[in-house]
Amino acid sequence: MLHRRIFQLPIIQRCRKHRSLSTLSQMADYVPKEDPDFSKMTNSTKMNLFTAVNSAMRIALETDPTCIIFGEDVAFGGVFRCSQGLKEDFGADRVFNTPLSENGIAGFAVGYAAMGGTCIAEIQFADYIFPAFDQIVNEMSKFRYRSGNQWNCGGVTMRAPCGAVGHGGHYHSQSPEAYLAHTPGICVVMPRGPIQAKGLLLSSIRSKDPVVFLEPKALYRSSVEEVPDDDYEIPLGQAEILQHGTDVTIVGWGGQLRTLEKAVRLAKQHHGISCELIDLRTILPWDTYTVSESVKKTGKLVVSHEAPITCGFGAEVVASMQEMCFEYLEAPIQRVCGYDTPFPLVHEKYYLPTEFKNLEAITRVMEFAK
């Protein structure tokens, strides 16, 4: 019934007019932009991460007549309220619920985007993205390639809350970015806060490639910033140096940046260590240039993420930096990550790569380099 109802919607007709499948740009044509100049944006609103996501989706619906939002419970705002008020303002044919079928959500997203539309599909928790892997890995990521660039599904953005939240346990705490990063043909993005979330999400929605947008759910209400009201985009595939330093490079992404900021402060206060802190922002494709230039300067690297250490995305960062910066390294590269166990409920505080574990890694590389 969902399939039949969706393809009777008048918005499908608007999709065909809005995009020509034969003229859509490819990934090679996507020219990265500079980060927006926030100093020129005079109007802002205090937002947390979920309201920043809401703001980005509202702008997408306003500026793109083919844009639709769908997923489990999104019509009433979703479990984290990210789509709150959008159905009321844009109508039930543009913001609507789906059955409890992640593979169906992903499959419909591929089909809708293949017809020229823009869609924002929500997977209620990133832990439940795995049933959708067939559509993501075998269809969404390969759609352009297998057609020899005759068609694509670049209009897909899949949002999914990820990471630890304090009480999520096995099935509501996982960080699946490494699984996704092993899939050529998609982009994987994870913001660290509200300003980044809005700009990166708008870039993801407007990208000509399908994007999986992972949102650290622990930040939905805890991370608050003055977010510009403007329609702005933050470029995909470009890391950001949050703090310049000379002694050791620290790399992370998403919610882990809050932990790393604490570790960097402790290193400076108690040991006089100058850390250069980098937020990857985009996991795939990731910014090897920014990281390698920093490692060549400092000679030392610590990479940290919540996901399990074995085959986590940190391993890719380490392998690449070992290859690109071998002659500059003064100490073994350190990874500070989650353990190789299912995500534990009562033992979460022991599992997480805290600021103290990262501080230990920072001091270890400094001692080795003496």
Image (spheres, rainbow, N blue to C red):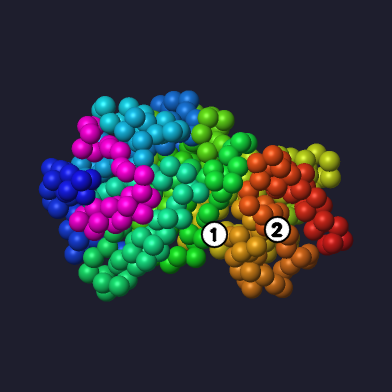
- Tell me the number on the disc at residue 178: 1
* Quadrant assignment, res 69: top left
Q: Between tags 1 and 2, which lies in front? A: 1
The total number of labels drawn is: 2
Residue positioned 54% across, 43% down in the render: 172
Q: Nearer the viewer, residue 167 or 247?
A: 167
Q: Nearer the viewer, residue 173 or 216?
A: 173
* Separation of residues labelled 1 and 2 (CA atoms): 15 Å
Say which amino acid is labelled 2: Arg
Q: Nearer the viewer, residue 354 or 197?
A: 354
Q: Position of residue 297 (x, y in %)?
A: 69, 60
Q: Position of residue 328 (x, y in %)?
A: 72, 68
Tell me which segment is drawn in magenta.
90-116
Q: Earlier in the sequence, mark 1 or mark 2?
A: 1
Residue positioned 32% across, 52% down in the render: 104
Vertical placement of residue 258 versus 143, above or below: above
Say which amino acid is labelled 1: Ala
How busy is the neighbourhood of tag 1: few (under 14 within 10 Å), some, or many (20 plus)?
Answer: some
Q: Name the image quarter holding the C terminus.
A: bottom right
Q: Is residue 350 left or right of residue 140?
A: right
Asked which secondary structure carries label 1, the reply is helix
On whether residue 353 falls in the magenta region, the answer is no
| Pointer 2 residue | 335
Residue positioned 48% across, 37% down in the render: 195
* Quadrant assignment, res 94: top left
Q: Position of residue 369 (x, y in %)?
A: 83, 62
